[in-house]
Amino acid sequence: MRWRGLVVTAALVGSGCLGATSAPAVAAPGARSVTVTVRTAPQLAGVRFLFDGHEVRTGADGVARFTGAHDFADHTLSVDDSGLGEAGRKFRFVRWAGQRDPDQAYRTTVAGLPLRADYTVTAAFTARFRITVRCVDQDGRPVPSDRVPYVTVRSDTGRTRRLPVGRPVWLEGLLPVYRKSVLTSRKVGYTLVAADAYGTNAVDAGRQHFSPAADKDGKVVFTTPFHDLTVSAQDAVFGSPAGRAARVTMPDGSVRTVRFGDDRVATIRDLPHGQYVVEVTGAKGLTAAQQIRLSRNQAVELRVVSRTDLGLAGGAVLGVAGGLLVVGRRLRRQRGGAS
């Protein structure tokens, strides 16, 4: 079966008739011949139809016809959509148009069709496409699926789906449209709503779009930006490097601790934009903390109380330390209240 776009012509062959590429049956002398044409949306080849039990499949041009002698009997038309598809695509019958009886529009078999004048019946199908989502950062580098395990998309029909990253899934890609008694097919569009990373949305909703029917290889690529956070600390009085490590609370509440290197800097890489709390502990367990909203590569410098501060400045430094401790506690309370 071949998929050839958004309009398909199919036709049927009845008793004594040949296939779509054959000549119509010859009616008895004096009898008028009648042709019934079936069109499918979207355009398909290889679809199996039965007219009064006689089978025909749509040809390479998507056309098959039933031609028979004029009569006043009732005739039956049916469609078989089992196994209808190919690699990466699956089709399912939805409805007819032009079958005369509106109560039979959604049945796979319709009865009571006439053979008194030429007419056309349209068979509409939905199509699902197999797609695989992957993510890249703002520089085009692949993002591991364990960092962004899921994305959320919304179709233009209003349906929301949560899709795994790196694993194939099936999405609706073509839908029938019935307007002014004409049955056609349209592509379904999707918008990226969210990309889950460390308990926060790594993307701006509504800015990235795709259509399964337009992606020939079944691969959908989203850009999920990540940033680096650089932390350093100085003592509160003398400005010399202080602290041993930076403690970063992630948006999901998990904590990452990174020791300062020889350059007295700790760098946490590949973080999504979102709210973070950065802490550095100085002497006597006194902690300096700062809450930040990360939206780009960013450097944070904290001022903490060192042992030298305590030994040389005594009470004055303790006053500064107390203030830092109060700020740290306040930030932690604010974070707890927001969760």
Image (cartoon, rainbow, N blue to C red):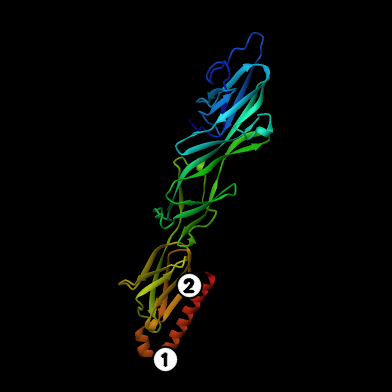
Disc 1 marks which amino acid?
A: Gly
Query: Which residue shows up at 53% across the image and 20% down it?
Result: 19
Q: Earlier in the sequence, mark 1 or mark 2?
A: 2
Is residue 116 depicted above or below 99 in this figure?
above
Tell which of 172 and 182 is nearer to you.
172
For label 1, the SS is helix
Residue found at the very far top of the displayed protein: 29
Q: Would you identify the image quadrant in which residue 182 lies?
A: top right
Disc 2 marks which amino acid?
A: Gln
Could you say where residue 224 lies in the image, as x and y percent from the top left? 46, 56
The residue at which mark 2 appears reads as 291
Residue found at the very far bottom of the displayed protein: 315
Could you say where residue 240 lies in the image, as x and y percent from the top left? 35, 80
Is residue 91 depicted above or below 200 in this figure?
above
Could you say where residue 23 lies in the image, as x and y percent from the top left? 55, 15
Query: Which residue shows up at 48% across the image and 75% down it?
Result: 332
The residue at which mark 1 appears reads as 315
Q: CA distance from mark 1 to mark 2?
A: 28 Å
Could you say where residue 297 lies in the image, as x and y percent from the top left? 43, 64
Q: Which mark is residue 261?
A: none
Asked whether, in this view, residue 101 is left or right of residue 7, the answer is right
Residue found at the very far left of the displayed protein: 262
Is residue 297 depicted above or below 148 in this figure?
below
Query: Which residue shows up at 45% across the image and 42% down it?
Result: 218
Density class for disc 2 (Cα within 10 Å; few <14, some 14-19, many ≥20) is: some
Density class for disc 1 (Cα within 10 Å; few <14, some 14-19, many ≥20) is: few
Asked whether, in this view, residue 68 is left or right of residue 84, the answer is right
For label 2, the SS is strand
Tell which of 289 and 36 is nearer to you.
36
